[in-house]
Image (tube, helix red, strand yellow):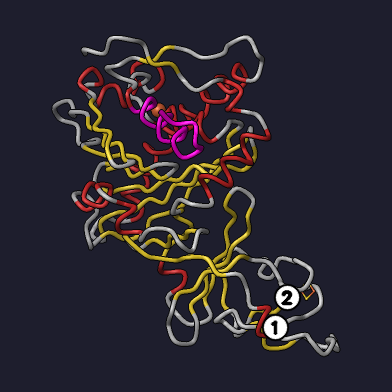
Amino acid sequence: MDQKSTTYTLPAKLYHENDFFKVERDKIFSNEWQWVGRSELVKNPGQFITAEITNIPILIIRDSNNILRGFHNVCRHRASKILLDKEGKCKSLVCPYHGWRYGLNGKLQNSPYFYGAEDFNPDNFSLFPIKVSEEFGLVFVNINVDSESLTSWLGPFTEMVNRVYKSNFVFHNEITFDVNANWKTYVDNYQEGYHIPLIHPQLNKDVVWQEYTLINTDSTSIHSVPPRSGSHEPGSFGWHFPNIIFNAYGRGAVFQRIEPLKPKWCRVVYNLFRPSDVSEEDFESNEGQYQKEVSIEDQKIVPLVQQNLETGIYQAGPLSPKYESGLAYFHQLLMERIGIGE
Ligand code: FES
Ligand SMILES: [Fe+2]
């Protein structure tokens, strides 16, 4: 490595301060595409899923013309959430508070017993739209309606996924963990293989961690690590800013996202996919178990880091130019989006 001066981590306070969490919500999570669910859950008219992006409730629903639409999950009357279930099917969107009813296209259809004033025009009270798009059989949303297309946003991430993610893959299962750590503490951990030998004993037997390499470009980090002989564990896999991850996993693949819940909490969601000719039991007892073990190992160490980032003792630490360039790249992108970039 020919890097002259040391790159440092982000200041520790950015990993727990409330104010910075709000800045991230407005500058990052309200502008970047977010993976929120699977397309198969919203295949038919009336089917919906709901999600929250840094506590901003949203809903995605297929309308009667088969168009997939996304809205803020907020009633235009007095701001109640409209859909409360995680997924389901409905004929129209009825607010549980005072019964205002919206069509699947978001238009206000009925406001019962409201007796609006003369100037009340229901056309002015449609649901607030957000952008929706689909790729890899997944639903993505962007709160910023003027944002770039999902295809252009994904960039080289798409090719990296498509090298592994085959059309015969079927959904295996979803695993969710709430972790006592800022979302960035978790992403930092994903962005390096330097911790493999001490944290992941089994993975360490399957890959040559010393030969771990990263290509950081177009808001994406493509990771590669050669397998040891006899192992079929990971080839290339990667991350796209800010919080989506794709891993080749034995015979299957996994999409992962790190949802920011609160400044000191994140939710890690995995969706595992297996080839259709591999049985559920077979995949679960091999790749499924393996994935769980690796995640549990990460979840033991990450909160220990988080605790120390909050004490005020540690301010920032040095990054390895060889093995931690993924963190440096992540931090650079984050600061650029926030407007404190180089
Ligand atoms: S808040 Fe939705 S109907 Fe009143
Ligand atoms: Fe790890």
Q: Are marks 1 and 2 in contact (CB under 8 Å)?
A: yes
Quadrant of the rendered image holding ligand 2: top left
In front of the other: 18 or 86: 18
Q: Is mark 2 within 8 Å of ligand 1?
A: yes
Is 60 rendered above or below residue 65?
A: above
Residue 23: name its quadrant.
Answer: top right
In the rendered image, the vertical position of residue 58 relative to residue 322, given as above or below: below
Q: Identify the element where label 1 is drawn.
A: strand
* Depth check, front residue: 93 or 278: 93
Q: Is residue 18 magenta?
A: no
Task: Say which label, 1 or 2, has the lower sequence index.
Answer: 2
Instruction: Give coordinates of residue 182: x percent, y percent.
Output: 57, 32
Query: Which residue is painted at 65% across and 82% down in the image?
Result: 102
* Position of residue 296 measured from the top left corner of the image (x, y, whole percent): 48, 31
- Amino acid under label 1? Arg
> Which amino acid type corresponds to the residue marked 2 in the rendered image?
Cys
Q: In this image, 127 relative to 2: left or right?
A: right
Q: Position of residue 337 (x, y in %)?
A: 46, 40
Looking at the image, residue 175 sits to the left or right of residue 55; the answer is left
Which residue occupies 45% across, 66% down? Answer: 132
Q: Residue at point 29% right, 22% down?
A: 204
Q: CA distance from mark 1 to mark 2?
A: 6 Å
Residue 341 on the magenta span: yes
Q: Name the residue that disc number 2 marks.
A: 95
Please give the residue where the numbered disc 1 appears in the rendered image: 101
In percent of width and height, residue 342 lies at 40, 28
Viewer-side residue, 333 vs 161 = 333
Q: Give the main secondary structure of the magenta stretch.
A: helix
Please report the bounds of the magenta region as a residue range: 326-342
Q: Residues within 10 Å of mark 2 (few under 14, many from 20)?
A: many
User: Who's the residue at 27% across and 43% down the image?
Assistant: 248
Q: Quadrant of residue 151?
A: bottom left
